[in-house]
Amino acid sequence: MPTEALSFADDGDVPNHPRWPMIVYGQAIARETLQKSEYAFDELFERNGWPVAWHNGIYPFTHYHSKTHEALGIARGEATVQFGGKSGKILTARAGDALLLPAGTGHKLISSGPDLLVIGAHPPGSNRDLMRSGEVDKAGVRARIVGVAKPNTDPISGSAGAMLTLWI
């Protein structure tokens, strides 16, 4: 499974994470497996200690989480998403791909097909929040992001995943 690490600078509005990159896991689950069961990401995340929080899509506005990291598994369809805020990067994620966003990483749906299904998970004990661009307490938000602990396991590979070597 190929992985890619992407770092985004604080753009003054969307903080992104100051140290840890977003990780893209290409074909974390085979498309054939997902065709048999769209719950394959649920099982993978749960097995690796990341409780599933939701099944849906991705919001069509720039947002981020200041109190938790987020794993996204594309269970069905594909989505074109902008990561990192206005000066970030636009990627297309397809069924089988997974994305790990450290706290503060901006993301916004640009387009998707009607069959898109995304599975979202967070580390145990997370206190989820939804931050939109334009937040006024920028110093407080950035302090919360830096304070979010590194999880014990990678949501895709458990105790031997890319997160454990890239988030140092």
Image: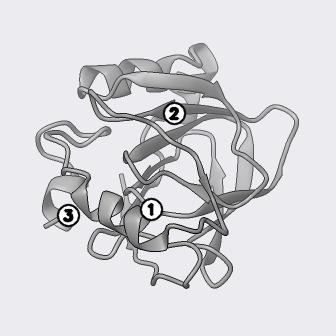
Say if 66 sits above or below 95 in the image.
below
Which label sits on residue 120? 2
Sequence order check, earlier mark of 2 and 3: 2
SS for callout 3:
loop
In this view, which residue lies farthest toward the right? 114
Graded by Cα atoms within 10 Å as few (under 14), some (14 to 19) or many (20 or more), the crowding at tag 3 reads some
> Residue 104: which disc?
1
Identify the mark at residue 160; answer none if there is no mark: none
Amino acid type of disc 3? Answer: Trp
**Amino acid type shown at disc 1:** Gly
Image coords of residue 111 (percent x, y): 83, 55
> Mark 3 highlights which residue?
167
Q: Amino acid at mark 2?
A: Gly
- Crowd rating for badge 1 (residues with CA inside 10 Å; few <14, some 14–19, many 20+): many
Say which residue appears at 31% left-offset and 29% top-offset: 50
- The image shows residue 159 at horizontal and vertical percentages of 11, 39
> How many C-alpha atoms fall within 10 Å of the one at disc 2: few (<14), some, or many (≥20)?
many
Of 75 and 134, the residue lying toward us: 134
Q: Residue at x 39, y 64 (%)?
A: 140
